[in-house]
Structure formats: structure tokens, C-alpha cells
Amino acid sequence: MKLTRRQLPATFSRMAGSSSLAAGMAPPAALTQSMPGLVRIDPTPLFPISPYLHMQFMEPLGVTDGSVEACWDYDAGNWRSDFIEAVQDLAPGAIRWGGLLSRYYRWREAVGPVAGRRPMRNYAWGGWETNRVGTAEFVELCRRTNAAPILCVNFLSDGHRYFARTREGNRTGDAREAADWVSYCNDPDDTARRRDGATAPYGVKLWQIGNETSYGDAGFTRSEAIAHTIAFAREMRGRDPSIRLIGWGDRGRSDDPAIWAADMLRQAGEYLDYIAIHMMQQIPQRQDTVLRGRAYQDDPARAWAELLEMSHGIEARLLELEEVVAAQGSQAGIAVTEGHLSLAPHNANPILEEWLTGAYHARALNTYQRHGARVRIATAADFNCTRWTVAAVRMQVPRGVSYLTPAGSVMRLFGRHNGEHAVAVTGGPSDLDMAASRRGNRIFLHVANLSYDVAAEARFAIDGCAITGGRVLEIAPERPRQVVTQDQPNVFAPREKPIGPGQAVTWRFPPTAVSVVELDFKQS
């Protein structure tokens, strides 16, 4: 059953939020033909869902976007309290430190007494970084937000020779420098860390070797990158055999456009737990796109349709990489350590603050979860920004509030309400994009209504089970162009409504809504 926006208010008032079928109805298998819109859930666990499937990544962005400097309270000598509260609410499974910055980042400059830290020129993003936020502060952020830290090492500047001869000196880090960072973080007896006041190790287990190493023609060739990855991995694992390593495997240079993952896993796979790509080139497919600047404001329905067209590219890339990894007989997981919409103006399109992007991000996250047997680390946005709109967290400056963007709101909703194992879900209205999981006797369905102006009704049934109750957490703004701002930071907070009990339960999803359906069940 579908309803237009004009029909929704009266229909919702009659429904009072939900309806259910009587508990004495026939089992779900017998209802398949008689129940249009039936969604069937097989509660059999398929594969474990990684706790890092909703990660964030943090990178100092200089004068381009003062994201890291802005979230530090210099008066208090601590993270801004509003920033910490927003990140705790977002609840990322992991936070990664790195990006292009890693090519010239020397970790020793950002440890120890603050007065002795050396400022760093930010070559990629302009200006200078104070290094007030370094290893200790980053780990503390992760601990306070219950996120696993991921550190991206300086991988010989990804082969970019410029950084060996800058005006400020050699900015290239070698394998020993990376290994020393592992020791600093993880060796209980590391003298440098203990001298800096941290007697207990930081316990950083996730490390990335190489960031966008294959992009452009100025860095390593594929063979060079593989050889150096092996050297770095040996040095780093020599300091702590328990660390888990992420190697670079995305598409290559113009003279070598193949996916690097095949040869990287074939030659260096014994050292790697994950193979990384970035999912940032999510760009409009139409020549006459409205997703450039503010053109979308004249035709938001078309912008919505274009965004959903673009979302198919995520799965296409995952399928391609999964095939490559499987061909090597590798058990390595896929790590999408960066990923966001790439719209003009660069990283600052205002549409990313509007609910028009909500279903796009929900479908992206659902795609990662449906591929969660192989995808173990993923993100749908940059982490925190003051000017860019591609972030999960926007920050008022120089002080004020921190709040979640549409991408962050969807990541929060799906990340906080998710199971431990994926389960199969079939059927339902074609407009609903769904991913399902289970924890104990509770099913979690992540649902996005991809329709811009039509509601979709679905009936949920769990094979061989009765639904004993549940709830729906729903983000359903009245207007697709609803915008989040520092003056309205909570407009995308989900609303909770009850659902069930019954052999099958019914819910109508408003147009553009993104929801989590939680169903408690028992064997019939």
C-alpha cells in the first residue's frame, strides 16, 4: 500500500502509529500470498557484523577547515565538552587519525609536554597545525567516546618525493618511525611514553599502511608500494604481533589503472588483515545534474532521484573488490576508511545539511552491512568540520554547539540500534531499502523509504516465530529540504513509536523516512 504526502496526516491519525495482526493468525510462511508488502525475516545468523562498520576519520585540515583545532578548548586544556557529547551520541565504533596529512605527519612532534611540541605546516590543506592534539589526546578522545583508535602511519609519504625536501625539512617517515609509534602506543615498558606521563600503554590495535597511495602519478608504483608495505608490516609487527594491519588496495595510477588489491594480497597478504579503498568519488552521473552548487534547490525531487542513482556505485565497487579478494583466496576484510559524497563546490555543498541526503546515506550504510561478510570497516562521511558539509559532526566556532548532520544522524541511528549478526530479509515494497540483523531474540531492520513523495506499507513476519513487541525509531521530517543548523541542532532526532505484538506486524513508512524497526520474538 502506498500513500501520497497529501494522504499521510489523516491516515497516520487513524493508525496511531502502527497496527498488528492478531496473535492467532497463520504462520508467516502461509501468509506470503495473502499479505501484499510482506517482509519475511529469517532469524538464522549469517555472519557477524563488525563493530567498526560505522567509523569516523579525523584529519587536521589547516586553513581549509579548522576541524581539529576548533574542537580543542584551549582555555580548559581539553576537548570541547559539546564536541565530546556529540561524538558520544554518534557512538562511532572506531575513529581513524590520518588522511593526506599522513604523508608529512611526524608523530613525535605531537607527543610530550605541550610547550615543547613543534608546529607542523599543513601542506595539503594550507596553514599550520599547533600539534596540540597528538597521540595522547586522540587516544583519550577514543576512550571517552568508546571508539577503537586507528592510526594511519607516514608511509614514506606514499612515494611523493616532494616531502623529503620541503622548506621545513624532511617530512617523510620510514618503517622504523612507524614501528617506534607502535612501541610508543603499545609497549608497556616504552620509555618515551612513560617519560611523557603515560605509564599504561594506549593499546592501539588498528594501523593503516598507506593512504590513497595509488591515486595520481607522483607516488609509488604498485610494485614499490607492495615492497614497502611488507617492510613496514614486518617492522611494526615486530614490535607488537597482536596489531591488525590495513594495506592499500584501490585503483592505480593512469599508467597502471588496475586494482592494487590483487597483487597486494598475493604478495603481502600474509601481513594484512584488511585491504583499504576510499569511496569518495561519488559524483553525479548526469551531464545536466542539479547536484552542483545550489541548482538542486529549484528541483529537489530530481536531486533526490540523482542521489539514489549515485548510490548504486557503492555496491558496484564493493562487488568488484570482493571478487578480487576472493580470487586470491584471502580472508582479508575490506576497509572503506574514507567515503563521502563528492559534490561541487568541493566538500561544501549545502545539500549535505538537508534531509535530501538522508536516504542516500541510509542506503550506503545498508549496502555496507549487506556486504558485511567482507566489509569490516566503513564510513559514510568525514568526521568533524566547521566549514565543510561532508562531515558527520558540524561545529559552531569559535565555541558553541556541535551537532549531527543528516549523514551523522543516520549513522547514529543505525550504529546505536544494530544486531551482532546479519540475517536475511526478503520481500516488501520496492521503495524500501533494508538491511537486517539480530542480537539475541531481537531483530533490527534498517529501513530507508527511497520514495520522495509516497509512503510505503510493509508487514513484517519472522519465520517460525511470533513477534512479542517492538518499537520503531523514525527520522521523518515533514519537508525533504529540512535543514539542520546550530539554531536547530536536533531536527533529525528519531521519534520512538511502539509496534506489535503479533504473528506479523504492519508499519507505514512516510516518504523519505529513515527508520530502525526493532522486533522482539519467540519461537511459535
Image: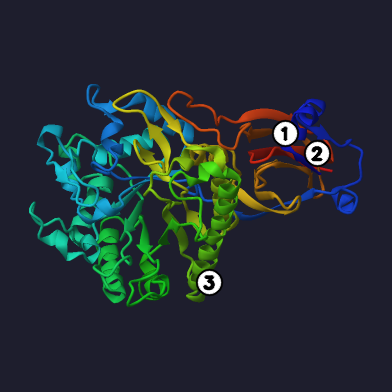
The answer to whether 486 is drawn above or below residue 312 in the figure is above
Q: Residue at x 33, y 65 (%)?
A: 215
Does the image show residue 372? no
| Amino acid at circle 3 | Glu
Mark 1 touches mark 3? (CB < 8 Å): no
Mark 2 touches mark 1? (CB < 8 Å): yes
Q: Residue at x 88, y 50 (%)?
A: 31
* Chain-order first, disc 1 or disc 3: 3
Dot label at residue 323: 3
- Looking at this view, is 170 or 148 the one in front? 170
Please identify the quarter of the rendering in which residue 26 is found: top right
Question: Which residue matches tag 2?
Answer: 505
Q: In the image, residue 390 lies at what x, y percent?
A: 42, 44
Quarter containing the C terminus = top right
- Determine the CA span between mark 1 and mark 3: 38 Å
Mark 3 touches mark 2? (CB < 8 Å): no
The answer to whether 252 is drawn above or below residue 403 in the figure is below
Question: Which residue matches tag 1?
Answer: 470
Quarter containing the N terminus = top right
Left or right for 479, reference 510: left
| Amino acid at circle 2 | Val
Q: Residues within 10 Å of mark 3 (few under 14, many from 20)?
A: few
